[in-house]
Amino acid sequence: MLKTELAELVRNGESSGLEFKRDDIRPEHLAKEIAALLNLEGGHILLGVEKDGTVSGLNREPAKAEEWVMDIGRQHIQPPVIPYWETLPWEGTEGTKRVGIISLPADAPDKPYKAKVKTEKRKNAWVTMIRVGTTSRHASREEEARLYQSSGLMRYDIKAAPGSSLQELDLRRLENYFRDIRQQSCPAPEEEDDWIRLLINTDLMLAERGKAIATTAAVLLFGKRPNHFLPQAGITAAAYPETEKDYAARERAMLRGPIAPLLGANDQILDNGLIEQAMDFVRRNIAVDAWIDDGGQRHEKRDYPLEAVRETLVNAIAHRDYSITVTDIELSLYSDRLEAVSPGRLPNTVTVEKMMQGYRAARNELIKEVLRDYRYVEATGLGVPRKIIRGMREHNGTEPDLVEGEDQFTVRLWK
């Protein structure tokens, strides 16, 4: 880090990625801050800087301070970490002081990181810390689960959906999937034990305490009523007349049902899945320009290329964080743009830049693989650069926006 960068950090004050601390802080308190930053997007801890931005400097010799920080990373963080350490001089009215800088990476791979703390009974306990604004606090059960999921240590889509059973799955869609899409033999409708065995072997059901329970992926893909078990399993769609949300929407719809469609001969859709429901909503609410060329041929051009819209919706459904239970995917059409907002941050190690280059990583691997069987997902993983980015450039010369927020990911296509 350069001196000018340090001065800029001190001048701007604490943030979600920056913490000021004295170097006489107790080890467990520093461990909490390190763990919290690692569980968000990394950042810096400046040792020798007061909360008000006053630089008091290190009280320890730089080498002793480094040894102390590294010991905390090994002994008070789980899994152990080796943070990047450096010191820089700070010129002030009271002479030269040194500031210790702990730098933590944005893509730490082993989330959740836990800090060792003392309980009221003076026993050691490991707690998961998260960063919220300028403060660090204990993670809730749901927040900790999302950290496990983001690191790939927990697959939410193959968790059991409590209370579900084979009877809650649409056997027509399952037959269609195995017989026609995968082109393999499948049991007769009345052979329940054979169906359960097949679904357990393909991660669509789990055997727990003598009962067969559908997984989250099975309920989402093939469930008769996915929202009964997963209230967040759907899309809230709205078409607005202007550029902002308005009570006077042209159309609003709560899109519900299984993701997978029911297909007939020649891939004719007999019953829409969630993706096709959303596509129908878009088609109803975008304009089509039509003209006759000099040769008498008719041409049409929609506000948005449907292939780019479909890829946007598929990504939102396949990669959303289903552990966030309070909100649907949000599909919004405005007079100048289309937006799809998917709950949850990008999966661990995934960045917007990597997505634009065709980086392949999935939060919900089973859902993605089934959608690939239906040919909604490209095997190459190049849907974003080819269908969305290149598709919009060729359609109207615009660049789509891919924006990661605190708890959501937005794809924005410009009209």
Image (spheres, rainbow, N blue to C red):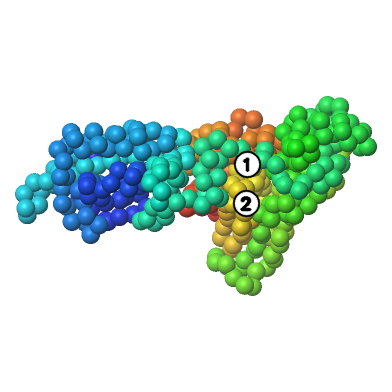
Residue sitting nearer the eye, 73 or 176: 73
Mark 2 lies on a secondary structure that is loop
* Horizontal relation, residue 53 to residue 109: left or right: left
Residue 338: image location, x then y, percent = 59, 56
Look at mark 2 in the image and give the residue it sits on.
304
Mark 1 lies on a secondary structure that is helix
Residue 74: image location, x then y, percent = 34, 33
Query: Would residue 415 be seen by someone viewing this image from the given angle?
Result: no
Q: Local crowd at mark 2 within 10 Å, few (<14), some, or many (≥20)?
A: many
Query: How many numbered callouts?
Result: 2
Q: Quadrant of residue 116?
A: top left
* Horizontal relation, residue 246 to residue 222: left or right: left
User: Label 1 to label 2, Cα distance in Å?
Assistant: 33 Å
Residue 53: image location, x then y, percent = 21, 56
* Horizontal relation, residue 276 to residue 384: left or right: right
Residue sitting nearer the eye, 14 or 32: 32
Look at mark 1 in the image and give the residue it sits on.
156
Q: Local crowd at mark 1 within 10 Å, few (<14), some, or many (≥20)?
A: many
Quadrant of image for the N terminus = top left
Quadrant of image for the C terminus = bottom right
Query: Would residue 322 be seen by someone viewing this image from the given angle?
Result: yes
